[in-house]
Structure formats: C-alpha cells, structure tokens
Amino acid sequence: MSSSALAVQAADQLVRDYSLSLCATEESLAAVREVIASQLKPKVLDVDLKAEYPEAFLRALGLAGGFNGAVAPEFGGNGLGLKHVIQVMEEVSKECLSSGFLVWCQTACARYIQLSDNDWVKKTYLPRIASGELLAGTGLSNTIKSCDAIEDYRLAARRVDGGYVINGVLPWVSNLGADHVFTTGCPVRGEDSCSDGLLFVLVDCNQPGFKLVDCAHFIGLDGTRTLACQFKEAFIPDNMVLAHPSESAAYIKRIKPGMILAQMGMGLGLIDACAGLMAQSNRTLSHVNQYLDDQFEDIDGALQEGRAASYALAEQLEDEPDADLTLDILKLRLAGGELSVRAAHAAMLHQGAKGYLVRNAAQRRLREAYFIAIVTPATKHLRREIARIEAGHACDA
Ligand SMILES: Cc1cc2nc3c(=O)[nH]c(=O)nc-3n(C[C@H](O)[C@H](O)[C@H](O)COP(=O)(O)OP(=O)(O)OC[C@H]3O[C@@H](n4cnc5c(N)ncnc54)[C@H](O)[C@@H]3O)c2cc1C
C-alpha cells in the first residue's frame, strides 16, 4: 500500500476512534445525569443544611460508571480519561458542590493509584474504587503545600523492616469513614531526622495505629465527611506504597497537573448553575438586573471559554503526559476559582432577597464558591506559584 493510502487509513481510524469515544462519553454522561436526578437532587438540601453525607448517591454514581474515567480499562475503567472525570464532576457540581468535591476525592485517589508503579494496589483496589464499592479520599493538601514551602509537614515516616511507620495528624481529609481508604504523602526521616525524600502511600482507615476524629464543622461542604486523621506509630507495609522516596519526584510530576486540572469540574458545574440562577431571575427582573456589573452573557461567555480550555488541557495531558502544561493549568485553575466567586456573587445579586432565603440555591452557591477558591491549591497559593514560575524559579511539576 502507498504511503498516502496508509495516511488516509490512519486518519480514518482516528476519526472512527474519536466518534466512538464521543458516543461512549454521551452514553456515560446520560447514565450519570439519571443518577443525579434520582438520587442527588432530592438530597441537596440535606447535604447542605444537615451535613448529610451522600453515600448512597456516591455508590450509585460508581455503579453508573461515574468514576471510570480515572481508571484504565484493565482495572474496570472506561479509558475516557481526565476529560470524563471533569465532565462527571461538572454534572454533579451543577446540583451540589459537596458531592462534586466528593467525586474529585474519589477520582483523585483512583488516579494516584493508577499513576503509581504498584500493580498489587492497582489490582486489589482500583476495580472497587471505580465501581464505588470502596470509597476513597486524598490527604495531599499538606504534602503539596509543604512541597511548595507554604507550611510544615504534618506527618513524618521512618523506614522499618517491610514498610514504614507514620506519626502525625492531618486536620482535614474528606470522603472518609471506617471502611474507606485514602492517599497521603510525607517525608521519610532518617536517624539524623533529615528528610530522605517523600513517601506516598494508600492508607486503610481501619488499620492499627490510625484513627479518624470528627472535629471540624464548616459553613458549607459540611456533608463531605471531612475528618482529622491521626497516625500513631501506624505501620504501612511496602505493598501499600505508591512511591518510595527515590521515586517520589517523578511521581509528583505525574499526579500534580491532573490533580489540579480535575478541580475545574467543580468550578465549571458551579458557574453553570450560577448562570442558570441569573437567567432565571432575568425572566422577571431584567429591567433592574441590567444595572448589575456582571450580566448573564459575561458569566456564560467566560464559562464557555473555561470549559473549552479545561477539556483541551485534559485531552493534551492524556495524550502527552510529559508535556509541560503546569503554568497553563495553574492559570486556568486560578481563573476557575475567581470566576466561581464572581459568578456566585452575581447570582446572589440577581436573585436579590429571594437568594438570601435559607433554602435558596444562591446563598448556598456563594458559600460553595469560596471553597473552590480556598481548597488546595488556594487562590493565594496559585498566585504565589504562578509568580514564582514566571520569575524563573523551577516548579516541582
Ligand atoms: C471542607 C474542607 C474540606 C477539605 N478537604 C480536604 C481533603 O480532602 N484533603 C486535604 O488534604 N485537605 C482538605 N482540606 C484542606 C484544604 O485543602 C486546605 O489545606 C485548607 O483549606 C487550608 O488552606 P489555607 O489556604 O487556609 O491554609 P493556609 O492559610 O496556608 O494555612 C493556615 C495554617 O493552617 C494549617 N493548615 C491548613 N491546611 C492544612 C492542611 N491541609 N494540613 C495541615 N495543616 C493545615 C497550617 O498550620 C497552616 O499553616 C479541606 C478543607 C476544607 C475547608
């Protein structure tokens, strides 16, 4: 066959693959929307006002394939990657940011496992996390902030026969429970107490030496089962290690860009919902709403741009995992947090006094929007990292 015929054949195959993945995505998102309508919509106020943890919804979402984008097909995933993760999180966050954040926790943990070199953990845990049978969190805020020299490490590990022993406390980790798992990372200290590098592990909340403590309550996102994690001489066997200190620099580079980019799913869903509240109010109040700074078209236009940029970066990250997309991702994530707060503020002003009612979505969206701007990496953290990179400092990932 001539080289031009081969090129045509390859292009045809690409088009076929692309159409197949579009069909698979549409089918999967339709199933996700059904679960949201039947299991989440009736519960949104209970999650927000009564701090009810939406466990039944999360399990149903898992069964409907909502977490599958984070997992390779050989471990029960769908091969649709990070874009699918963002799209599912977006659909969920249109209704409820607490649940959208829990989708992020579950899929972030799955992705950290998927991107490790530990085949035993992949085989043992990924199919159960993908299906929602096992619920999972991630306690990496402190690790990331400490790597970026913002705060001190809260956990420390020491090497022992067959594993590591960890001590310390993480104040806030979400999507946890006695039969859940989560990932975290901390320095391994030698006898001279100098750090030998970072260790990343999967922790079983049921294991000896580990305790969950319910000590913090929040003005929003309180239904996310955010608990303190106490490690007291907790032994983590080698088979639960996602990256040993010698592997951790490369591991952080693999997980960090996707971890941050995926959070855009929360912002896109929330901004979409705020634009909806503005449009709804304009049906009767556009004669006075037109004097507000941000109009529906402003927020909706910025949303469309943010969505296109998020999907494009997610596809690029999957196709070229070694590409340096850090600065683009940090800037997009910063814009996502800022636009979330702006959109929720605009929705509140459009809705007026109605938006101030306890059961109205506008004031809930405002409280939720601030979470997007303060969860790690927070607005101040993102601005610091962007400034550092633009000033020529090397970044970790
Ligand atoms: C509802 C909710 C859910 C959260 N869920 C998670 C989660 O699932 N996983 C997770 O890792 N983090 C979680 N966090 C923590 C979050 O990502 C940020 O770390 C936290 O909001 C603090 O950010 P900050 O910018 O205010 O901290 P800063 O202003 O930079 O820090 C203030 C000080 O508070 C303490 N501190 C703050 N955050 C942490 C932390 N993460 N670990 C240890 N000490 C800390 C430190 O002493 C720090 O110096 C959650 C926070 C909230 C409010």
Image (tube, grey):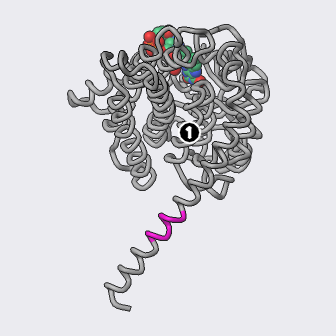
Q: Is residue 16 magenta?
A: yes
Report if residue 136 is visible in the image. yes
Outermost residue to the left: 391
Task: Name the spot of residue 109 as percent of width and height, x first.
Answer: 61, 36
The residue drawn where x is 53% and y is 60% is: 21
Q: Is residue 377 in sight in this rendering?
A: no
| Residue at image point 61% right, 24% down | 98
Please provide percent x and percent y for residue 8: 37, 80
**Residue 62 in the image: above or below residue 158:** below
Residue sitting at x 40%, y 29%: 336
Within 10 angstroms of label 1, few (less than 14), some, or many (20 or more) residues? many
Height in image: 80 above or below 156?
below
Q: Which residue is mark 1?
A: 243
The front one of 293 and 198 is: 293
When the figure is inspected, residue 287 is found, relative to residue 394, above or below; the finding is above
Q: Is residue 278 left or right of residue 387?
A: right
Compared to residue 318, the image places residue 347 above or below, namely above
Tell me the kind of residue under disc 1: Ala
- Viewed as shown, does residue 77 lie left or right of 372? right
In x, y percent, where is residue 192?
A: 51, 18
Q: Closest to the observer: 315 or 252?
A: 315
Instruction: Say how many tags the image has.
Output: 1
Q: State which quadrant residue 14 falls in.
A: bottom left
SS label for mark 1:
strand
Membership of 31 in magenta stretch: no
Q: Quadrant of the C terminus?
A: top left
In terms of depth relative to the viewer, which is nearer, 124 or 39? 39
Q: Which residues are magenta?
A: 14-20
For the N terminus, the image quarter is bottom left
